[in-house]
Image (cartoon, rainbow, N blue to C red):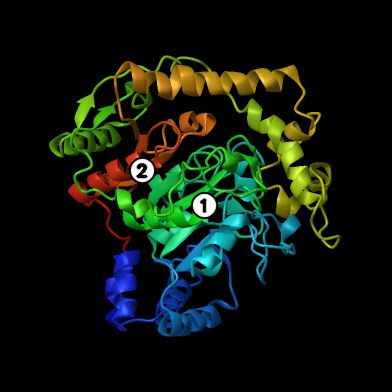
Amino acid sequence: MSTLDWLEEATIITLQKEMVAGRITARRLMTYYLERIAALDSGGPKLNSILELNPDAVFLAEALDHERIVQGPRSLLHGIPVLIKDNIDTGDKMHTSAGSLALANSYAKEDAFLISRLRQAGAIILGKTNMTEWANFMTRGMKNGYSSRGGQVLNPYGPGVFDVGGSSSGSGAAIAANLATIAVGTETSGSIISPANRNSIVGIKPTVGLISRHGIIPIAPSQDTAGPLARNVTDAAILLGALAGVDPRDPATLVCQDRSQNDYSLFLDANGLQGARLGVPRNYYERLDDDSLQLMQSAIAAMEKAGATIVDPVTIPSASAKTDNKVLVYEFKPALNAYLGKLSPQVPVHTLRELIAYNQQNAETMLKYGQTLLIESEATSGTLTEPEYIRARLRDLQLSREEGIDAALANYDLDALLLPGAWGASLAAKAGYPSICVPAGYLPNGSPMGVTFVASAFEEPLLIKLAYAFEQATRKRRPPQL
């Protein structure tokens, strides 16, 4: 692997240039990642980030190499290996289980819409990543990165010491350790931003509906979205463009017609912070320890030096309002039942009720942390007619949008808000608005920390511009020492 050390932090654009020049092939790139997976994920520190590999990955790489010679590349993703979170359907020889042994033998009948988009772009599905079981909506107190099917994912910056973040834990850890070029995660509330923050990588949580939800094991349709995880903003932007698109089977994507981009790399502007107005809502900084606060202050100072105007502090009108996860509890049951009901008869569970019973019957392997959230959700009607749900949904939108992000941006004439790490991730999640987390540095103990930019709906181009400018001005990310 020593002759290919340059691959460790190479961007997709660099990889494509090297492929065009004939200095590397998709087949050789695939071999490089498989060697690293054997050495670091299955062996060595045993990060445990990957649940299974695609048995056809090498064949696909060879076919795409041949296609490049005969027809030329399909896109910037031609021949690029991608890891997929295990709650996203792939209609191939790999399972889709959401990390649960209850679905350990479940094969999706077809690709999720976003997987079809990736394949059309020439990307290679390398494998499925481990995750917090049921996307961390199984119980309270479950450890980030744990699943009954895959066990515990470890953070490559401190295996067994530092939190790996959830629930796209495997995707985050794998990309941090350079086990693939890019990965796809999902988020309902913090599950892309959190592992990006904990693993010193870039994560984009898009506007809900920018990427189709079809073929993704759900939690709450009003907040669910997939999104990119990468080692740099360039790769995350390229992946976002491949994932975004209108899907007739997902009504949320119809809202995004004429609002999505095919190529978000157009917004990679190293001077993107010049003239930007960024707000610092200090209520999200109150729980930071001194080291974390100092790191954030350094990040803010770097943005100011790069030409941004920092408005500090800003007040979010709804900041003092108490919030909860009632919407998720109510939406989970009907959404999950709709997904499970379409699975093969060979799968042992086809409803949430059957899943709870299966877990209880196999408690020793299934209930290490319990299933309180599953039980709470099953107790609802599954029709979304309860007044408590309707009021909670409308209240979430009011507090996160009109009295939240939109109010703060308008009141202070801001382009975006600056949040520390994954603090405040639920604000953008409940609004359905985009956010992007970028490495901001490391605490004295070596634990990574990121800074998160948040803006209003469909402002991905702006967020990518700001994040790229910050990344280029600071270049804080460094690979883990494995």
Crowdedness of circle 2 by 10 Å Cα count: few (<14), some, many (20+)? some
Q: Nearer the viewer, residue 427 or 378?
A: 427
Which quadrant does the N terminus fall into?
A: bottom left
The answer to whether residue 105 is left or right of residue 414 is right
Residue 474 in percent (x, y) is at 20, 48
Which residue is denoted by mark 2 in the rendering? 461
Residue type marked 2: Pro
Answer whether labels 2 and 1 touch (C-beta < 8 Å). Answer: no
- Whichever of callouts 2 and 1 sits on the residue coming sooner in the sequence is 1
Which residue is denoted by mark 1 in the rendering? 185
Return the residue found at the far right: 345
The answer to whether residue 146 is left or right of residue 368 is left
Residue at 29% across / 44% down in the picture?
Answer: 465
* In this view, 360 is above or below 91: above
Residue at 49% across / 70% down in the picture?
Answer: 122
Residue 150 in percent (x, y) is at 61, 60
The answer to whether residue 358 is left or right of residue 20 is right
Residue type marked 1: Gly
Task: Choose mark 2 or mark 1, whichever is in front.
Answer: 2
The answer to whether residue 184 is left or right of residue 335 is left
Res 174 visible = no
